[in-house]
Image: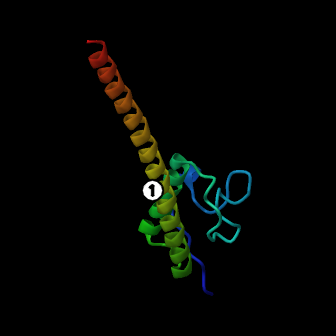
Amino acid sequence: MDKKRTAKVADPAKASDGVDSAGGPLSGQGADGGLTDISGLNFEQAMAELERVTGSLENGDLPIAEALSAYQRGAALMRHAQSILNHVQTEIEVVESDQQQRVDRSALVAQIKD
């Protein structure tokens, strides 16, 4: 008599029920809905999945065990997305530093020529 409730989703095309349109688990999610490797997700994929997970948690219809699993997955997705952003920030700093060094070298060369 104990019926399992599932999250309601406004748009069935965006449903995060753990199964993709081909019938397999969603990226990074095992058949049991547990945490699996998310390292292959790019930033946009991680954020899209985080939005789905957050939506299902906000809906409040998940059983407590599934809600805990979803929360853990969301936390892992957030850490993964943050690490991607940190890497991009480092890349930007390297590019900016290299550009500044080029400007400094140009100014030095100009002073030497004078």
Q: Please tell me which residue is depicted at 55% across the width and 52% down the height of the picture.
A: 14
Q: Is residue 89 visible?
A: yes
Callout 1 crowding tier (Cα within 10 Å): few <14, some 14–19, many ≥20: some
Question: Residue 86: x, y in percent?
Answer: 44, 52
Quadrant containing the C terminus in the rendered view:
top left
When the figure is inspected, residue 99 is found, relative to residue 35, above or below; the finding is above
Q: Please tell me which residue is depicted at 53% across the width and 56% down the height of the picture.
A: 49
**Amino acid found under the numbered disc labelled 1:** Gln
Q: Please tell me which residue is depicted at 38% across the width and 35% down the height of the picture.
A: 96
Identify which residue, 66 or 73, lies in the foreground.
Answer: 73
Quadrant containing the N terminus in the rendered view:
bottom right
When the figure is inspected, residue 77 is found, relative to residue 2, above or below; the finding is above
**Residue denoted by label 1:** 82
Along the horizontal axis of the image, is 112 left or right of 93? Answer: left
Q: Please tell me which residue is depicted at 65% across the width and 57% down the height of the picture.
A: 26
Identify which residue, 92 or 32, lies in the foreground.
Answer: 92
In the rendered picture of this protein, how many numbered marks are placed on residues? 1
Question: Residue 38: x, y in percent?
Answer: 61, 59
| Colour scheme | rainbow
Q: Is residue 9 visible?
A: no
Along the horizontal axis of the image, is 25 left or right of 89? Answer: right
Along the horizontal axis of the image, is 106 left or right of 81? Answer: left
SS label for mark 1: helix
Residue that protrudes farthest toward the bottom in the picture: 1
